[in-house]
């Protein structure tokens, strides 16, 4: 069954943090090394979902805020007491933060759900301070072209999440048009660290072919001071 993004995450929310998902594991591994050197003071996580990244950043000393368009995902995030009062229900196209509120904007595994990419990048650019950084990860277009799905199961029902397929150039152009400068852009594939997840899910036979495909991209942009 194909379901619109926010509706899908309503159903997925209670299971999201407990599912065996090699893409979440890979994103964590790859994004961690991107974020480590940044040491931001104020972080806004756009489409933060269940708040997967926020405690990690809090523990590293950052003041964190998150927003998401799905109440049920945010409800899961509020189970972590340290996030209470730090989360807002909002669409990525209209961020509920004042201009220059963050040194780092994080947007993980969500870009493909946003309708107006140009508007979202403009909001990123408005919300980040001069010299601040925007780190975005998402499923790689090659993975989608190879037939990978944005999907999840609830019981025996499989749900496919509706999304926008975009070329990397289109994403880069939206960032440039918003006045942002690319700092780095990585294309990341699954590796040995994710093999145990395939094994636990009984899907080891798919691992070799899966790891030959670019699974994710991680783009880092900055708002230039001049
Ligand atoms: C796959 S989850 C990723 C959550 C989290 N960033 C993570 O990495 O675990 C995608 C998230 O995007 C949110 N989302 C979808 N469309 C949105 C929109 N237009 N504005 C804000 N959030 C949106 C969903 O509710 C969901 O929480």
Image: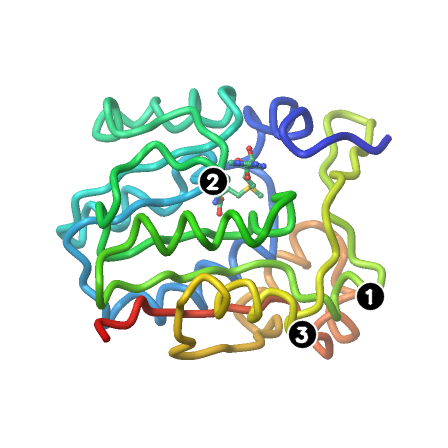
Name the residue located 74 percent from the left edge and 38 percent from the top edge: 161
In whole angstroms, how far apart are the C-alphas of marks 2 and 1? 24 Å
Q: Earlier in the sequence, mark 3 or mark 1?
A: 1
Residue 221 located left or right of residue 168: left
Point out the quarter of the image occupied by ligand 1. Answer: top right
Q: Position of residue 118 (x, y in %)?
A: 56, 54
Question: Of the numbered discs in the image, which one, if any, rests on residue 219?
Answer: none
Q: Which residue occupies 65% across, 23% down? A: 11
Quarter placement of the N terminus: top right
Mark 2 Cβ and ligand 1 under 8 Å apart = yes
Task: Look at mark 2 in the image and give the residue it sits on.
Answer: 47
* Relative side of 65 to 2, left or right: left
Q: Secondary structure at mark 2?
A: loop
Q: For numbered disc 1, what is the local secondary structure?
A: helix
Q: Nearer the viewer, mark 3 or mark 1?
A: 1
Report which quarter residue 64 is drawn in. Answer: top left
The span from disc 3 to disc 1 (Cα, nearest Å) is 11 Å
Q: Residue tagged by mark 3?
A: 214
Instruction: State the count of labels.
Output: 3
Mark pair 3, 2: CA separation: 23 Å
Judging depth in this view, the residue of 56 and 5 nearest the camera is 5
> Callout 2: 10 Å neighbours few (<14), some, many (20+)?
many
Numbered label attached to residue 145: 1
For the point 65% across and 52% down, the residue is 200
**Disc 3 residue crowd, few under 14, some 14–19, many 20+, Cα 10 Å:** some
Residue in view at x 47 percent, y 40 percent: 47
Residue 114 image position (x, y, % from top left): 61, 44
**Which is more toward the observer, 111 or 155?**
111
């Amino acid at each position: 069954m194909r379901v619109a993004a926010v509706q899908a995450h309503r159903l997925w929310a209670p299971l999201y943090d407990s599912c065996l998902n090699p893409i979440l594991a890979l994103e964590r591994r790859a994004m961690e090394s991107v974020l480590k050197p940044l040491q931001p003071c104020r972080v806004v996580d756009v489409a933060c979902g269940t708040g997967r990244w926020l405690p990690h950043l809090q523990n590293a000393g950052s003041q964190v805020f998150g927003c998401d368009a799905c109440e049920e995902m945010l409800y899961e995030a509020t189970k972590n007491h340290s996030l209470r009062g730090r989360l807002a229900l909002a669409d990525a196209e209209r961020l509920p933060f004042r201009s220059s509120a963050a040194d780092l904007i994080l947007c993980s595994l969500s870009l493909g759900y946003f309708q107006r990419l140009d508007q979202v990048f403009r909001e990123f650019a408005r919300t980040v301070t001069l010299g601040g950084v925007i780190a975005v990860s998402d499923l790689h277009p090659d993975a989608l072209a190879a037939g990978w799905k944005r999907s999840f199961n609830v019981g025996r029902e499989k749900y496919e999440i509706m999304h926008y397929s975009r070329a990397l150039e289109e994403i880069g152009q939206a960032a440039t048009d918003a006045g942002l400068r690319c700092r780095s852009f990585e294309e990341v594939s699954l590796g040995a660290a994710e093999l145990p997840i395939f094994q636990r899910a009984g899907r080891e036979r798919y691992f070799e072919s899966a790891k030959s495909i670019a699974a994710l991209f991680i783009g880092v942009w900055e708002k230039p001071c001049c």
